[in-house]
Image (cartoon, grey):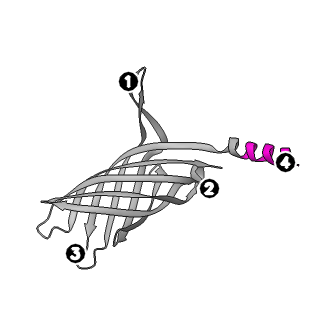
Amino acid sequence: MLVAVFVVALAASAAAAKIGFSLQLRGRGHIDTTTGAFSISARGPSQIDKVKITPRDGITYEVENKIGSFATLTAFGSNQVVQGNITFGTHQSQDHAIQFAGSSYGEDVGQSSYFSVLGLPTSGTGQFQGINGRFSAAGVFERFNTTGLDAIGTLHFTLYGETP
């Protein structure tokens, strides 16, 4: 009986698909200075940047296309809590998505806002159905109006996880 349970557990773990990718996105952000609420909308090519570091080969860099032609990230939050989603596809169809939630930290220096986020995927659709893992994001946005509320910038989104 114990052997059967071990074999079933081993088969289940072998069936999990590992996922790991990074995306570079460009977008707009807005912050409400009275409440601290913020939102970000960013978009980039649906391509995955891979950097491998090995003792033998040193650093290698690869870019591979992912699902569809672009990735779109939408996030919002306040008081250091963020939630949102990232979708993959074309302008007509975005059937593959990851919903996420996490903790954020930001710092303003002059006209620049720097931020980082750590969190978990909460659900997924399409190729990301049943995803679990961890993600991080970091970026910088430059404010472009005199009120300092609107900004444009880039962010780097990285996810490591698995799907059943």
SS at badge 2: loop
Residue that mark 1 sits on: 58
132 drawn magenta: no
Q: Earlier in the sequence, mark 1 or mark 2?
A: 1
Give the magenta-colored segment's residue range.
Answer: 1-12
Between tags 1 and 2, which lies in front? 1
Residue 129 against residue 83 in the figure, above or below: above
Q: Earlier in the sequence, mark 1 or mark 4?
A: 4
Amino acid residing under circle 2? Gly
Between tags 4 and 2, which lies in front? 4
Q: Residue 157 at x, y = what percent? A: 39, 50
**Whole-number angstrom distance, CA of label 2 to CA of label 3:** 36 Å
Would residue 47 be found to the left or right of residue 163 on screen? left
SS at badge 4: helix
Residue located at (47% from left, 54% from top): 87
Contact (CB < 8 A) between labels 1 and 2?
no
Q: Earlier in the sequence, mark 2 or mark 3?
A: 3
Residue that mark 3 sits on: 33
SS at badge 1: strand
